[in-house]
């Protein structure tokens, strides 16, 4: 650009904020004057990330976004974490595999432990709708599933009333249909509690978002090996441990009963012999 650079006052002020060399900008105003729009264009091209694609929220992704926004806007989220020993549940899984002919997923094993704990603390098996807490006698657990369509939460029904063999068949069927986008409305309604598992992704702790109108959700984290002191022998041993992350709606339940429920989940994981695996 030859001669004196013509720049509007607003454009010069904006350029100073980004330390823009005005000689690198070609003005689009009268007689080649550099305008605010010219500077803004330069800033977008040099200081902001290049857009590869725009994807509008639509379909099931839009529904998910709406529900999560509603959850975070209305529920008073509180998350508590608790470490549990997984050694006995791992051994129980091996024994169950011998009877079933295949290893049941940890999600199903944990769902059974959660269902038994919910039966002991039924006030967590509830929803909050229109300023009314509704406590359910039936325990239907939503299982969060990562799919190409987003995070979907199909329902396993009457988890405490069914054996691990029956639940395993239902679980495999609903997971397959979820990932193929073949769910029906009946597969996603009527849940009373949710479980979401990020352990396979190496997550140690997170804050699950409540699945409205439910009042609680359990987050499952990764399993790790680490040393611990055996209380009986005083010896240092290596064990496998996991963190559980319980998010609850403080409008419907206080911290103490939520913690007691999580303690009971921990108890059944660490004492799997007290869980009725075959009903």
Image: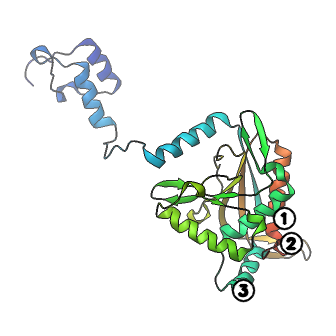
State the CA–CA distance, disc 1 to disc 3: 24 Å
Depth check, mark 2 against mark 1: the one in front is 2
Q: Are marks 2 and 1 in contact (CB under 8 Å)?
A: yes
Q: Percent x, y for residue 235?
A: 86, 76
Residue at 33% x, 36% y is 47
Per the image, label 3 sits on a secondary structure element best described as helix
In the drawing, what numbered circle is on residue 274?
Answer: 2
- What residue does disc 1 label? 267
Q: What residue do we see at 66% from left, 55% from top?
A: 205
Inspect this view and state whether residue 189 appears. yes
The correct choice, above or below, for 35 with respect to 191 in the image is above
Q: Quadrant of the N terminus?
A: top left
The relative height of residue 160 versus residue 51 in the rendered view (above or below) is below
Q: Which residue is mark 3?
A: 99
Which numbered disc flags the more N-terminal residue, 2 or 1? 1
Instruction: Give x and y (percent) for residue 8.
Output: 23, 13
Q: Can you tell which of label 1 and label 3 is closer to the viewer?
A: 3
Give residue 274's position: percent from left, percent from top.
86, 72
Q: Earlier in the sequence, mark 1 or mark 3?
A: 3
Q: Nearer the viewer, residue 100 or 263?
A: 100
- Residue depicted at x 84% and y 64%: 267
Classify 131 as above or below 89: above
Nearest the camera: 137 or 210?
137
Q: Quadrant of the C terminus?
A: bottom right
């Amino acid at each position: 650009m030859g001669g004196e650079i013509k720049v509007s006052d607003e454009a010069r002020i904006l350029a100073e904020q980004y330390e823009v060399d005005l000689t690198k900008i070609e003005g689009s105003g009268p007689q080649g004057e550099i305008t605010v729009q010219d500077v803004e264009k330069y800033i977008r091209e040099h200081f902001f990330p290049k857009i590869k694609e725009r994807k509008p929220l639509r379909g099931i992704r839009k529904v998910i976004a709406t529900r999560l926004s509603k959850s975070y806007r209305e529920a008073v989220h509180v998350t508590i974490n608790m470490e549990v020993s997984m050694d006995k549940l791992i051994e129980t899984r091996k024994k169950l595999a011998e009877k079933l002919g295949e290893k049941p997923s940890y999600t199903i094993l944990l769902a059974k432990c959660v269902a038994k704990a919910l039966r002991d603390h039924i006030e967590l098996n509830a929803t909050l709708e229109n300023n009314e807490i509704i406590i359910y006698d039936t325990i239907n657990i939503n299982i969060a599933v990562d799919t190409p369509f987003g995070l979907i939460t199909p329902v396993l029904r009457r988890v405490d009333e069914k054996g691990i063999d029956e639940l395993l068949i239902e679980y495999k069927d609903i997971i397959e249909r979820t990932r193929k986008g073949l769910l029906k409305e009946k597969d996603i309604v009527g849940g009373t509690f949710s479980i979401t598992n990020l352990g396979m992704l190496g997550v140690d702790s997170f804050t699950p978002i409540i699945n409205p109108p439910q009042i609680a959700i359990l987050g499952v984290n990764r399993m790790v090996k680490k040393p611990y002191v055996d209380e009986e022998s005083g010896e240092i041993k290596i064990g496998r441990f996991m963190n559980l992350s319980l998010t609850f709606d403080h409008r419907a339940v206080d911290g103490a009963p939520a913690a007691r429920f999580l303690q009971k989940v921990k108890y059944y994981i660490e004492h799997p012999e007290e869980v009725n695996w075959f009903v």
